[in-house]
Image (cartoon, rainbow, N blue to C red):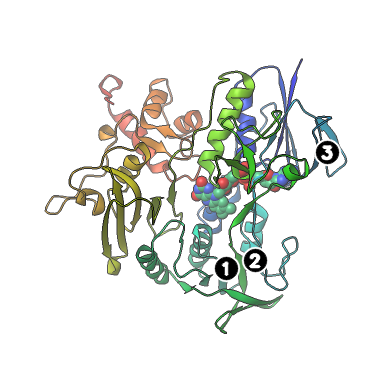
C-alpha cells in the first residue's frame, strides 16, 4: 500500500525532506503543506537579498520544483488528530498520514513594547524572518534615510549592514553590553562595533527599548536611559522562538522545542520533527546545516535506506554575512573548562583573533577581520584535530617572520576537509563528483548541493573545480 507522508512546513527543512524522499523513490505519496504563500526559498539568503547582492529569483530553492511532490502553498495546518492520523488545514481540508513530519520552524519574537502585536505590526515596523518581512523592509527602505534595528545579534547586524549598504543611517539598539554575545567576547565585540561604525552603523549598547511611537511618518523609540531615537524604519531582530503550538495542542512532548530522539521521532512514533522546531538532546539548532542533516536522517529511516541512521550534531561555525566584515566564530566564547587562551587584537585595523585550546584541540575561536588562517581554524575545529605547535600561524594567519601563507590551495587541502558547512560536503566528495563527469561549477553544485546554503563556500567550490579542470584527471592527488 502507498505510504502517505505529510510534511507540515515548506521551509528549509520541510522542502529538503521532500527532496530527499523523492530522490530515494519508492511507493510513497509525499504531501507538503506550507503556510507561506511562496514556493520554498532560501531563508538564510534573505540577508543577502536585503543587502541588494541578489534578487528574489536567486533565493528560490529549486529542489522540490515539479518533483512528484504534492506541494500546497498558502495552506496552514491547524490541528493534528493523532488517533485518526489526520491533519486539518485552515481551508477546511483533512489529510490522512501514515507518517507526519513537523517542520514548522521558528517565529520572530516580537518584544513587549506598546503598539507591537506579532500579527499586525504598525507601518514602518517589520520583523526579519520571512520573504514577506524582507519585502516589507525593502519597500519602506526605498524612501527612507534612516533605520533602527532592535537587537544586535547575528541577524540584527546582517540587517543593519544590509540597510547601511543601501545608504541608510542605521542605529542598532542592543540591551546587552556587547554585540553578538552568544558568539563573541566583549573585546571582539568592541572591535566589531568599531568596524560597523566605519560602515555607517551606530550601536547603542546595554540599553533596552521601553517605548515606541510608530505611524506612517516614522518611528520613535524611547530607551530606558531616557533617550529617544527617531528613524524612518524599525526592524525587529529580537531572536526566534520554535513554532511548537501545533505539536503542543496535539499532546506531543514539548519543551522549548518539540522533543525528538536520535531518529527525530517525537513522543508519537508516527510523527517526527526536524529543523528549528525540534529539540534534540536538550538543544535547539536554529541553523540550516542541522536542519538538512535531520531531513536526511528522516528520509533514510522512512524509506528504509538506512533504518539505523541517527542524527549526530556537528560543531557549529557561525559566519556573519555582511559585506566588509569577515567574522567567523565557533565553540563557546566564554566559560567551560580552563585551557589555553590566545588573543590578538589590532583595533585600528579591525582585527581580532581569539583561540581557546584544551588538550591541543580548539574548543572555541573568534576571528574578526583579515586572517588568512580562517579556513584552517574552521577545519581544525570542525574535525577536532590537534593545533600546530606554533599557534601564531592560526592567530595571525602566519608565524612571525614567516611569509604569509599562500591562499589555501585545493591541492593542499585534505580529502576530508569540509568545504560546504551547510550541506556537509567535503573536498573529496567534490573531487569524486568531478571524476564522475561533472565538469562545471553549476554541475558540481547541482550534484553535491555544495554552495546552496549560505553560499559562503561558492568561491572555494569554484576554486576546486578550476583546479580540477587544470590538472589532468590522472594527476589529481587528494
Ligand atoms: C535573515 C536570516 C538569515 C539566516 N542566516 C542563517 C545562516 O547564515 N546560517 C544558518 O545556518 N541559518 C541561518 N538562518 C536560520 C535558518 O534560516 C533556519 O535555521 C532555517 O530556516 C530552519 O529551517 P526550518 O525549515 O526548520 O524553518 P523555516 O525555514 O522557518 O520554515 C518553517 C516553515 O513552516 C511553516 N509553518 C509553520 N507552521 C505551519 C503550519 N501550522 N502549517 C503549515 N506551515 C507552517 C512556516 O510558515 C515556514 O515557512 C537565518 C535566518 C534568517 C531569518
* SS for callout 1: strand
* Image x and y of residue 235, in percent: 60, 66
Q: Please, which residue is most extreme toward the left here?
A: 401
Q: Nearer the viewer, residue 472 or 236?
A: 236
Distance of label 3 from label 2 (alpha carbons): 31 Å
195 w.r.t. 228: above or below:
above
- Is 376 positioned to the left or the right of 235 in the image? left
Distance of label 3 from label 1 (alpha carbons): 36 Å
Residue appearing at x 43%, y 46% in the figure: 456
Question: Disc 3 designates what residue?
Answer: 88
- Is 8 positioned to the left or the right of 326 in the image? right
Question: Disc 1 designates what residue?
Answer: 150
* SS for callout 2: loop
Distance of label 1 from label 2 (alpha carbons): 9 Å
How many C-alpha atoms fall within 10 Å of the one at disc 1: few (<14), some, or many (≥20)?
Answer: many
Q: Quadrant of residue 7?
A: top right
Amino acid at each position: 500500500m502507498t505510504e502517505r507522508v505529510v510534511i507540515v512546513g515548506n521551509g528549509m527543512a520541510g522542502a529538503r525532506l521532500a527532496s530527499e524522499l523523492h530522490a530515494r523513490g519508492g511507493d510513497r505519496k509525499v504531501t507538503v503543506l506550507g503556510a507561506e504563500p511562496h514556493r520554498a526559498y532560501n531563508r538564510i539568503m534573505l540577508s543577502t537579498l536585503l543587502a541588494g547582492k541578489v534578487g528574489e529569483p536567486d533565493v528560490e530553492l529549486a529542489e522540490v520544483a515539479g518533483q512528484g511532490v504534492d506541494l500546497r502553498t498558502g495552506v496552514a495546518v491547524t490541528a493534528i488528530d493523532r488517533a485518526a492520523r489526520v491533519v486539518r488545514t485552515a481551508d477546511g481540508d483533512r489529510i490522512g498520514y501514515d507518517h507526519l513530519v513537523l517542520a514548522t520552524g521558528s517565529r520572530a519574537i516580537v518584544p513587549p513594547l506598546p503598539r507591537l502585536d506579532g500579527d499586525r505590526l504598525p507601518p514602518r515596523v517589520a520583523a526579519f524572518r520571512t520573504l514577506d518581512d524582507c519585502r516589507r523592509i525593502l519597500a519602506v527602505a526605498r524612501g527612507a534615510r534612516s533605520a533602527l534595528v532592535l537587537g544586535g545579534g547575528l541577524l540584527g547586524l546582517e540587517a543593519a549592514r544590509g540597510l547601511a549598504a543601501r545608504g541608510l543611517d542605521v542605529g542598532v539598539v542592543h540591551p546587552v553590553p556587547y554585540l553578538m554575545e552568544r558568539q563573541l567576547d566583549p573585546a571582539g565585540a568592541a572591535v566589531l562595533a568599531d568596524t560597523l561604525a566605519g560602515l555607517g552603523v551606530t550601536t547603542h549598547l546595554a540599553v533596552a527599548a521601553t517605548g515606541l511611537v510608530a505611524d506612517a511618518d516614522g518611528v520613535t523609540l524611547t530607551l530606558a536611559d531616557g533617550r529617544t531615537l527617531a528613524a524612518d524604519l524599525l526592524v525587529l531582530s529580537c531572536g526566534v522562538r520554535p513554532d511548537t503550538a501545533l505539536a503542543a495542542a496535539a499532546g506531543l512532548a514539548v519543551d522549548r522545542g518539540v522533543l525528538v530522539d536520535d531518529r527525530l521521532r517525537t513522543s508519537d512514533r508516527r510523527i517526527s520533527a526536524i529543523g528549528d522546531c525540534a529539540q534534540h538532546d536538550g538543544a535547539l539548532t536554529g541553523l540550516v546545516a542541522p536542519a538538512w542533516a535531520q531531513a536526511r536522517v528522516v528520509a533514510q529511516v522512512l524509506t528504509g535506506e538506512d533504518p539505523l541512521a541517527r542524527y549526530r550534531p556537528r560543531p557549529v561555525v557561525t559566519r556573519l554575512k555582511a559585506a566588509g566584515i569577515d567574522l567567523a566564530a565557533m565553540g563557546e566564547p566564554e566559560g567551560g573548562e580552563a585551557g589555553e587562551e590566545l588573543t590578538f587584537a589590532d583595533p585600528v585595523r579591525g582585527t581580532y583573533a581569539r583561540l581557546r585550546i584544551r588538550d591541543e584541540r580548539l574548543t572555541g575561536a573568534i576571528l574578526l577581520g583579515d586572517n588568512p588562517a580562517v579556513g584552517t581554524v574552521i577545519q581544525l575545529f570542525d574535525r577536532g584535530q590537534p593545533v600546530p605547535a606554533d599557534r601564531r600561524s592560526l592567530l595571525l594567519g602566519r608565524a612571525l617572520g614567516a611569509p604569509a601563507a599562500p591562499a589555501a590551495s585545493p591541492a593542499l587541502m585534505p580529502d576530508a576537509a569540509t568545504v560546504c558547512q551547510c550541506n556537509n560536503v567535503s573536498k573529496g566528495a567534490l573531487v569524486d563528483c568531478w571524476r564522475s563527469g561533472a565538469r562545471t561549477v553549476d554541475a558540481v553544485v547541482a550534484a553535491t548541493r555544495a554552495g546552496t546554503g549560505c553560499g559562503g563556500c561558492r568561491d572555494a567550490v569554484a576554486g576546486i573545480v578550476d583546479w580540477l579542470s587544470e590538472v589532468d584527471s590522472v594527476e589529481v592527488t587528494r
